[in-house]
Amino acid sequence: MYIQVSYVSSQNEINRNEIRSLVKGSQITEFNKLTIVSWDLEDEITVEGKKIRIVPLWKYLL
């Protein structure tokens, strides 16, 4: 599992380098559970065939 932490409240605020790092790491190691922990955004995006879960901090800590 790869986890990236980012202080964002919308998809537009997510730095493309953060996403690219997750995807690159996943391609090298074949770990496919990718997560971005955000301030309050909950979503799921697909980049280069990899699903990335975006989960708010409060939910991640539960």
Image: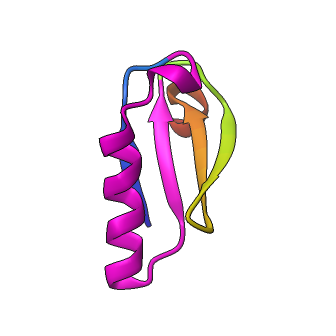
The N terminus - image quarter: bottom left
Relative image position of residue 4 (x, y in whole percent): 36, 45
**Dividing the picture into quarters, in which one does residue 30 lie?**
bottom left
Residue at left offset 31%, top offset 56% = 21
Total numbered badges shown on the rendered structure? 0
Relative image position of residue 20 (x, y in whole percent): 36, 53
Residue 62 at least partly seen: no
Task: Inspect the magenta stretch and tell me whether residue 6 lies in it.
Answer: no
User: On screen, 49 above or below 8?
Assistant: below
Residue at left offset 34%, top offset 83% = 29
Task: Inspect the magenta stretch and tell me whether residue 17 lies in it.
Answer: yes
User: On screen, 11 above or below 37?
Assistant: above
Residue 3 at least partly seen: yes
Residue at left offset 61%, top offset 24% = 41
**Dividing the picture into quarters, in which one does residue 23 lie?**
bottom left
Q: Is residue 41 left or right of residue 35?
A: right
Front position in the image: 37 or 60: 37
Relative image position of residue 13 (x, y in whole percent): 45, 20
User: On screen, 23 above or below 59?
Assistant: below
Q: Is residue 40 left or right of residue 1?
A: right
**Dividing the picture into quarters, in which one does residue 27 lie?**
bottom left
Front position in the image: 25 or 37: 25
Residue at left offset 65%, top offset 47% = 45
Give the magenta-colored segment's residue range.
9-38
